[in-house]
Amino acid sequence: MRIAATGMLVTVCLSGAALAQDVRATDPFEDYRAARYDEAIAGAEAALESDSENPVWWGLLAEARAQSGQEEAAAEAFESAARFETDPAKRSYFLRAQALNLAYAGDHAAARGVIGQAMANPSLQTRQSLDWAMVAIAAGDDTAAQDILENEALYDGFTRQSALDAGYSAKRRGLDRRAVRFFETGLALDNSEEQPLSPQQREAIRRENRELTRDWSFLAQASYSTAGRPLGPVLPDDEEALQVGAEVSRRIGGWRNGRPFSFFARAYLSDFQSDTLAASNAAQGWIGLRYKPLASVNFNLEASRLVGLDEQGIDDWSVRGAISGGAGLEPEMAARDWTYVHYYADVSYLFEHDTTYALAEGRLGQTILVDEASTTLTPYALVRADFDSGRFDEEALGAGVGLLLRHWFDETDTVAHRGFVDLDIQARERIAGSERASGVLVTVTLGR
């Protein structure tokens, strides 16, 4: 914007706009072009003493102040330039520059006020200007920006950065398909840039596209544990178990800028390797809703109806909260190995059985890339604690080691890996509480 402003001022000056006619020892415009901004400011202020309604001198003063880092003073001068300017195109420019400098100064509310007034004036043709959309984004007015970007004729004017900025703005507004289109445009334009995006930057945008296009998800899992967790409220403390299951979920209303709603259904069959009748096979289903209330934290709230699929399954209502996160969870660009940190915790409550179950696990390891970009091997150490009010021994704390082999698949040039399959092996020893803290857990997971 500031670079473009110089060209506007020079054009205005040379076009014969009314300037002060007195002769000066120095030319403020030459001072401006030579980056002598203090001299340009002084010259413009001197000219305004005798020609106080000349928009060209106000514009020069505003530009010189902006280049000197005086954003608030620059915005005031641009406001005066717009007030005295009669040409709609030049007035639109001055108002854009006013709003932009207010945004630079941190006064986003005032900047949005300028944008709102300008958009209400048809003569300024704000909806035919990509520059106005970019200024609106800078001012934090994504509503106005996306209103302007309804005009697809403007897309021919995109640069890589303006397309990416428009994509993040559309994402914040919940316009998922439009955001993906802008991100794909930005990635395509990157091919002609002198300084292309780094592999890490490209991957970050591809991962944005992955979330924005994920309308549904699927997870299938099979596991073997020497310390299984039977479903009943009062069951033996240590069981060997096989378990297989799957979950399908569907988003309602898209990604919602990181706060999606989902409908899900899951079913698991547990085969408890015991002679105890109370710990026989159990088939359990869930149907429910999931909500992620925080955009920047992977925390989910879940409400579901448990449905027994056989005599050992249970019928109940449940609420659950789960949080997870970490670093190095996905392949890192331009690296063969990296630190792996992962944490997971959840708490669930069954109303009719008055049972609370909680689990927390932390992992620290080192991930090694075993092929070009999609298969990783991670040895790690872990600590795991759980609480189960339906058991004789409610608490269990253990630690151990694990090995995770994961393969990522289903990617495109503009969308990061959407699927994975992994083999996870853990061996744990009890530290405190129940003996179920010890054991071996082997899990195979397919997710998409």
Image (spheres, helix red, strand yellow):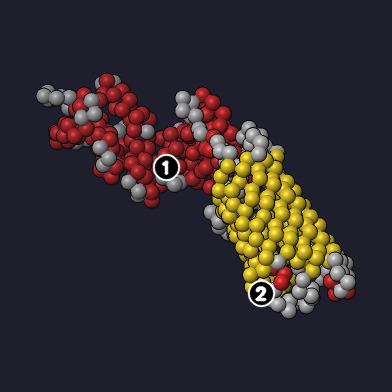
Measured as percent of width and height from the top left, residue 391 is found at: 73, 76
Measured as percent of width and height from the top left, residue 99 is found at: 36, 42
Q: How packed is label 1: few (under 14 Cα within 10 Å), some, or many (20 or more)?
A: many
| Image mark for residue 44 | none
Q: Which residue is mark 2?
A: 433
Seen from the viewer's position, the closer of residues 20 and 167 is 167
Measured as percent of width and height from the top left, residue 253 is found at: 65, 51
Left or right: 169 as drawn, with respect to 300: left
Say which element carries label 1.
helix
Measured as percent of width and height from the top left, residue 102 is found at: 34, 45
Quadrant in which residue 412 is drawn: top right
Left or right: 130 as drawn, with respect to 176: left
Q: How packed is label 2: few (under 14 Cα within 10 Å), some, or many (20 or more)?
A: some
Q: Is residue 80 visible?
A: no
Say which amino acid is labelled 1. Answer: Ala
Q: Is residue 387 above or below residue 150?
A: below
The answer for how far apart the CA atoms under marks 2 and 1 are is 55 Å
Tell me how many marks there are. 2
In percent of the image, x 25 and y 37: which residue is there? 68
Q: Is residue 23 above or below residue 398?
A: above
Quadrant in which residue 292 is drawn: bottom right
| Image mark for residue 138 | 1
Say which amino acid is labelled 2. Answer: Gly
Q: Is residue 220 visible?
A: yes
Seen from the viewer's position, the closer of residues 423 and 259 is 423
Q: Nearer the viewer, mark 2 or mark 1?
A: 2
In percent of the image, x 66 and y 45: which residue is there? 377
Left or right: 83 as drawn, with respect to 374: left
Say which element carries label 2.
strand
In percent of the image, x 55 and y 56: which residue is there? 297
Question: Mark 2–mark 1 contact, CB under 8 Å?
Answer: no
Quadrant in which residue 294 is drawn: bottom right
